[in-house]
Image: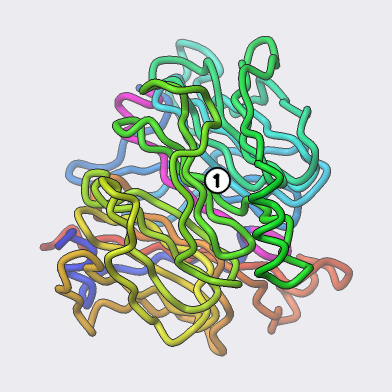
């Protein structure tokens, strides 16, 4: 089991009373900092792991934070979107990451030092380097297509996926839903879900595909053009969550399994060799999001307000592997993220009512309740 799951009972919780005004929709840890942004983030004490975590939310912002065993500190705030920021995605290098927004745009950001002589966290700069706004509607997903530089990115908006050149803002490819597919979806689902909007996106570089969860309970798998075929060609369509929004899709177990979670409260596991579902697990509560932690392990969140981690592939679930935010009452959680080493887990979600006069004065009565951030990390003493 990943370290954070094997040592769940002794993990250390780090919390922030507020990370966004209103709901937090997504959170993601950066890749290995030594490769993604070498030298940009101040190192921790000997033996202390340091991560960069980015969250985004209802207040039209993304927050960049540094995490270590002592706490969570601000690195920068990404401003410029005119609507809710829905997703975060990381590039492999150059401190690159992207945000997808309800304003119809995907913004590209870069984290780095203000100068070569900079030595402290206060000298870190987060800058917007491009805005891709040629989308038909809200952008619910984005994935970098180039693992060497900030070259191309895939996005999903309404019912289609797009491939865009970041520098020139040129659309290089797009999917095209067949009319017969749209008619079949419309005939089998309630009217409000009939368009089959794409609500999530994940990419497998090894398989050369993009997997998108939809509003009608379907998962649509598209070619990314890297393994033959054209970008946006439909590889497979499955319906593991009938008539329930698919909140998250992700590849786990070294890409052998495509996992998805839905508002129907189930986790569906699909074999990527055949694109056939081989297991469905019921959580007993609507699920909003999930993340891979390592191997076949998943962390999942939803209306229950807790993080539950299970070995979804190999049936080695531990009933003790539950992470409960230190807040009463619990609020629905909309996002969960794990770092690449499986040693840290983060979650956030709905706004928490402000209970103290000091906080109320700080946030102002006209703003939505702030959402909190909770991060669990493996104890350094073990």
Residue 223 visible in the displayed image: yes
Residue 153: x, y in percent? 56, 26
Q: By what rule are the colours in the image chosen?
A: rainbow
Residue located farthest toward the right when viewing the structure as drawn: 366
Residue at x 43%, y 87% (from the top left corner): 284
Quick check: 205 left or right of 305?
left
Residue at x 20%, y 76% (from the top left corner): 317
**What residue is pinned by disc 1?**
74
Magenta span of residues: 20-37
Picture quadrant where residue 245 is located: bottom right
Q: Is residue 185 magenta?
A: no
Picture quadrant where residue 18 is located: bottom right
> Dot 1 lies on which element?
strand
The one of 152 and 346 positioned closer to us in this rendering: 152
Picture quadrant where residue 213 is located: bottom right
Residue 222: x, y in percent? 49, 37
The one of 228 and 142 positioned closer to us in this rendering: 228
Quick check: 378 left or right of 260?
left
Residue at x 62%, y 64% (from the top left corner): 216
Instruction: Relative to 217, say whether 198 is above or below.
Output: above
Instruction: Relative to 137, say whether 304 is above or below.
Output: below
Residue located farthest toward the front when viewing the structure as drawn: 180
Residue 156: x, y in percent? 63, 40
**Quadrant where the image shows the N terminus:** bottom left
Residue located farthest toward the left when viewing the structure as drawn: 382
Q: Tag count in the figure?
A: 1
Residue at x 19%, y 41% (from the top left corner): 46
Residue 16 visible in the displayed image: no
Mark 1, Cα crowd under 10 Å, few <14 / some 14-19 / many 20+, is some
Quick check: 327 left or right of 174?
left
Instruction: Relative to 127, say whether 254 is above or below.
Output: below
**Quadrant where the image shows the C terminus:** bottom left
């Amino acid at each position: 089991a990943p370290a954070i799951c094997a040592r769940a009972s002794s993990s250390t919780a780090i919390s922030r009373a507020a990370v966004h005004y209103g709901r937090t929709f997504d959170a993601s840890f950066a890749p290995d900092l030594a490769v993604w942004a070498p030298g940009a983030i101040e190192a921790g004490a000997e033996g202390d792991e340091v991560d960069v975590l980015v969250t985004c939310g209802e207040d039209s912002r993304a927050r960049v934070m540094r995490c270590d065993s002592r706490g969570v500190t601000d690195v920068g705030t990404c401003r410029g979107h005119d609507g809710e920021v829905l997703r975060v995605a990381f590039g492999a290098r150059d401190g690159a990451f992207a945000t997808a927004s309800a304003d119809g745009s995907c913004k590209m950001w870069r984290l780095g030092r203000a100068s070569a002589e900079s030595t402290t966290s206060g000298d870190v700069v987060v800058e917007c380097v491009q805005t891709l706004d040629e989308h038909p509607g809200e952008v619910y997903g984005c994935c970098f297509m180039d693992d060497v530089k900030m070259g191309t990115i895939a996005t999903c908006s309404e019912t289609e996926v797009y491939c865009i050149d970041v520098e020139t803002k040129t659309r290089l490819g797009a999917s095209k839903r067949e009319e017969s597919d749209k008619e079949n979806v419309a005939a089998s689902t309630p009217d409000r879900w009939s368009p089959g909007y794409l609500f999530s996106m994940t990419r497998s570089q090894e398989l050369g595909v993009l997997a998108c969860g939809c509003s009608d309970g379907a998962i649509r798998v598209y070619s990314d053009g890297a393994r033959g075929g054209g970008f946006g060609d439909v590889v497979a369509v499955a319906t593991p969550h009938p008539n329930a929004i698919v909140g998250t899709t992700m590849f786990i177990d070294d890409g052998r399994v495509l996992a998805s979670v839905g508002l129907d409260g189930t986790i569906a596991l699909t074999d990527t060799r055949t694109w056939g579902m081989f297991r469905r697990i019921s959580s007993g509560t609507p699920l909003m999001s999930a993340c891979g932690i390592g191997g076949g392990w998943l962390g999942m969140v939803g209306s229950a307000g807790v993080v539950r981690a299970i070995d979804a592939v190999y049936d080695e679930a531990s009933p003790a592997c539950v992470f409960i935010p230190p807040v009463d009452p619990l609020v629905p959680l909309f996002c969960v993220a794990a770092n690449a080493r499986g040693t840290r887990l983060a979650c956030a979600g709905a706004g928490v009512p402000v209970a103290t006069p000091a906080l109320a004065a700080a946030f102002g009565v006209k703003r939505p309740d702030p959402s909190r951030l909770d991060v669990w990390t493996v104890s350094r003493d073990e």
